[in-house]
Image (cartoon, grey):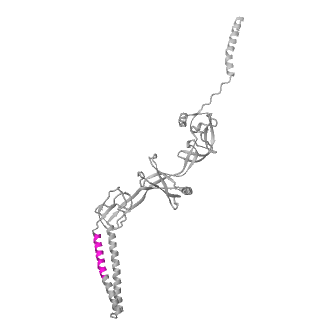
């Protein structure tokens, strides 16, 4: 089949092609233009100020409370308890009467000893008179010298008997004194093991009552032997402060002083025992109690401190991200001296007043733009 185009039809086709080309020109020109680069998103972070303040050098361990003095009260005689003059758990004073034993057997023993003494003293006096008389008879030549010496020997024997009787009287008096037991210290009584009417023997295995002195009181704890030279060095400069914190009462620490360093290191644990003395006026510390102990050795003024959350560890050591004034993050290597109370003491690498990132470091690279999430809080904290 043959198609024939006349001039009119050819003009229509030419115009349609031209219109299509003109319609494509804007699209072609648009493809040739460059698109603008996207704006980099800021990384949200939390920051903290690098501060300069006084930081204590401390040793922290677990310790337990011990009574300042413990006395187990035991009877020195065998007898029946006829009086208990306190109640269990009561505070007692030194010299306060605690127990009374039946004194009648011991009063009788004392009377018997005194009677024997009086009888032997009379015999001794008579022997002394006889000795003087026989001495004069020997001088007069009436009796033999041997007889006079026998009389003198009898006198000396009676003198010795009198001394023994006096000792027996004193012993009986002491035994009578033991029928009353007085408190040897100020303290608090514990569980009463024997009650009114019990018959006890002298010096039993278990005490009748235990008295603990709780004012003042000890806190005993052990520290690694490596810290001993430093402790001794600071003790030579003055008394060291010891703080005891009861679990659940961290806001109410008790303060005392280091008063005892043991004379040997425990070979099994490699630690050495120390004791702090606390006045314990309010009796918050109690024998047998476990406490958190802090021994303060010294204080370091003008230390550079940051939160421990800011410290990161890399292949070359510790570093932090510092937020610069233009809100870009810069990694900075630091040297950490020690950590205390969730704070890192920085030996080198930072200056007071700088800001470090404490949260969001995982998304940061050198030069990253940051957005400070706690900017408002930082502004409030910076106000005087």
Please tell me whether residue 269 belongs to the stretch shown in magenta: no
The percent coordinates of residue 142 (x first, y second) are 32, 94
Residue 267 visible at all = no
Which secondary structure is most common in the magenta stretch?
helix
Q: Nearer the viewer, residue 1 or 88?
A: 88
Q: Is residue 32 left or right of residue 310?
A: right
Which stretch appears magenta? Answer: 105-123
Which residue is at the far bottom? 141
Q: Nearer the viewer, residue 363 or 160?
A: 160
Please tell me whether residue 118 belongs to the stretch shown in magenta: yes
Q: Nearer the viewer, residue 143 or 166?
A: 143
**Image height of 328 relative to 96, above or below:** above
The percent coordinates of residue 46 (x first, y second) are 56, 37
The percent coordinates of residue 362 (x first, y second) are 58, 38
Question: What residue lies at 64% left-to-right and 35% top-to-bottom?
Answer: 367
Which residue is at the far right? 7
Q: How many marks?
A: 0
Q: Picture quarter containing residue 310?
A: top right
The percent coordinates of residue 360 (x first, y second) are 57, 37
**Image height of 46 relative to 300, above or below:** above
**Image height of 58 relative to 132, above or below:** above
Q: Nearer the viewer, residue 72 or 92?
A: 92
């Amino acid at each position: 089949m043959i198609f024939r185009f006349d001039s009119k039809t050819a003009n229509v086709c030419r115009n349609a092609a031209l219109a299509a080309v003109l319609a494509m020109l804007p699209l072609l020109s648009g493809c040739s233009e460059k698109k603008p680069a996207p704006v980099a998103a800021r990384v949200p972070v939390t920051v903290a100020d690098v501060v300069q303040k006084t930081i204590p050098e401390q040793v922290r361990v677990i310790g337990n409370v011990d009574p300042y003095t413990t006395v187990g009260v035991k009877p020195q005689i065998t007898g029946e308890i006829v009086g208990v003059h306190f109640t269990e758990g009561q505070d007692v004073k030194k010299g306060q009467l605690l127990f009374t034993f039946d004194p009648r057997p011991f009063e009788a023993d004392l009377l018997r000893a005194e009677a024997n003494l009086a009888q032997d003293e009379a015999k001794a006096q008579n022997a002394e008179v006889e000795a003087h008389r026989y001495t004069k008879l020997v001088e007069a030549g009436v009796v033999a010298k041997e007889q006079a010496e026998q009389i003198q020997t009898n006198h000396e024997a009676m003198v010795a008997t009198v001394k023994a009787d006096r000792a027996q009287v004193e012993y009986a008096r002491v035994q009578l004194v033991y029928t009353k037991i007085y408190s040897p210290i100020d303290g608090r009584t514990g569980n009463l093991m024997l009650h009114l009417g019990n018959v006890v023997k002298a010096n039993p295995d278990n005490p009748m009552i235990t008295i603990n002195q709780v004012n003042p009181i000890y806190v005993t704890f052990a520290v690694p032997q490596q810290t001993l030279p430093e402790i001794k060095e600071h003790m030579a400069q003055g008394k060291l402060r010891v703080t005891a914190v009861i679990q659940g009462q961290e806001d109410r620490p008790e303060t005392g002083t280091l008063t005892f360093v043991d004379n040997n290191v425990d070979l099994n644990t490699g630690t050495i025992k120390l004791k702090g003395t606390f006045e314990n006026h309010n009796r918050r510390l109690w024998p047998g109690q476990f406490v958190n102990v802090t021994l303060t050795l010294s204080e370091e003024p003008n230390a550079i401190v940051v939160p421990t959350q800011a410290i990161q560890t890399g292949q070359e050591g510790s570093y932090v991200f510092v937020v610069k004034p233009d809100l870009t993050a810069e990694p900075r290597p630091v040297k950490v001296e020690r950590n205390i109370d969730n704070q890192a003491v920085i030996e080198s690498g930072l200056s007071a007043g700088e800001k470090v990132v404490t949260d969001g470091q995982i998304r940061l690279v050198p030069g990253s733009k940051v957005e400070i999430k706690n900017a408002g809080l930082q502004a409030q904290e910076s106000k005087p």
